[in-house]
């Protein structure tokens, strides 16, 4: 009887130990204090944090051993916390705050990347009508940036629209690059091509302006050209019918 009872109690102890250990290993970070000898997913979170912040170099195994203990002591000492090698109290609060800050930054970065990807996809979809390549879209945006940086957004869209209007007009070349680099009567049609400003990277506003123009927004009512009256006295551009003025630019038909 005693042997059977002993065997039963031994088995019960083993089962309880396994169950308790398994339960501990599934605890979320912050649900318990952590000390040397503990193991679980929450220990792995702590180890990863200590690795990322330069307090520990080692495999993340979810086991709170001597290496993790020493690393936690270093973290506590660096932050003027009680150096007891136990993740609890102020040590736990600080680590949770730093982890939350990292999560927020990661989420913001992911959100920003998703927005950029969505906008790029929208631009490519809108450009399907013209069969623009990504390189052509980049060239397009650089020209809009060079010609209209500092203008109201509507004015930037207007500049982009005039370029598309030229593509639709038989008077002009039928490819984007040919329109942008066109030389007529010995003159470049766009001054940024002549002075090299077209090589400057396009800003986000110019890229959005290109996207809106590709989607059909034309604030110019079909204009194919524009000029800044404060910067040119050219009689030729001033002789053409004006469709509108936006910002510092006058838009005209030719």
Image (cartoon, rainbow, N blue to C red):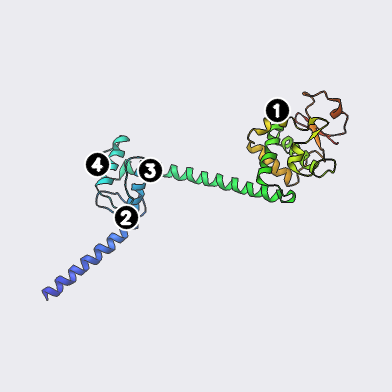
Quick one: label 1 or label 2, which is nearer the N terminus? 2
Quick one: label 3 or label 1, which is nearer the N terminus? 3
**Which marked residue is nearer to the observer: mark 4 or mark 3?**
3
Spatial CA span between label 4 and label 3: 21 Å
Secondary structure beneath dot 1 equals helix
Location of residue 214 (image quadrant): top right
With respect to residue 175, does 232 lie above or below? above
Q: Which residue is labeled 2 in the image?
A: 40
Spatial CA span between label 2 and label 3: 19 Å
The residue nearer to you, when weighing 217 against 85, is 217
Quick one: label 2 or label 3, which is nearer the N terminus? 2
Secondary structure beneath dot 2 equals loop
Q: Which residue is labeled 4 in the image?
A: 84
Quick one: label 2 or label 4, which is nearer the N terminus? 2
Image marks 4 and 3: residues in contact by CB distance under 8 Å: no
- Left or right: 89 as drawn, with respect to 4: right
Q: For the point 79% across and 30% down, which residue is it?
A: 187
Q: Which residue is labeled 1 in the image?
A: 195
Q: Which residue is labeled 3 in the image?
A: 52
Residue 149 appearing in the image: no
């Amino acid at each position: 009887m005693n042997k059977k009872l002993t065997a039963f109690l031994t088995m019960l102890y083993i089962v309880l130990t396994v169950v308790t250990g398994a339960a501990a290993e599934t605890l979320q970070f912050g649900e318990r204090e952590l000390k040397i000898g503990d193991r679980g997913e929450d220990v792995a979170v702590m180890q990863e944090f200590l690795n990322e912040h330069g307090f520990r170099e080692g495999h993340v195994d979810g086991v709170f051993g001597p290496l993790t203990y020493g690393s936690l002591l270093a973290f506590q000492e660096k932050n003027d916390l009680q150096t007891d090698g136990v993740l609890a109290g102020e040590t736990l609060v600080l680590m949770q705050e730093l982890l939350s800050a990292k999560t927020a930054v990661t989420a913001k970065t992911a959100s920003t990347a998703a927005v950029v990807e969505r906008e790029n996809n929208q631009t490519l979809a809108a450009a399907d009508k013209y069969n623009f390549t990504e390189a052509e879209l980049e060239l397009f945006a650089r020209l809009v940036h060079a010609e209209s940086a500092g203008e109201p957004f509507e004015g930037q869209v207007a500049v982009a629209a005039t370029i598309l209007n030229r593509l639709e007009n038989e008077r002009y070349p039928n490819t984007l690059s040919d329109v942008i680099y066109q030389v007529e009567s010995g003159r470049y049609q766009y001054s940024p091509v002549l002075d090299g400003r077209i090589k400057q990277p396009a800003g986000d506003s110019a890229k959005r302006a290109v996207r809106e123009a590709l989607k059909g927004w034309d604030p110019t009512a079909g204009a194919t050209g524009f000029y800044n009256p404060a910067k040119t006295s050219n009689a030729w551009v001033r002789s053409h019918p004006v469709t509108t003025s936006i910002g510092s630019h006058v838009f005209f038909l030719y």
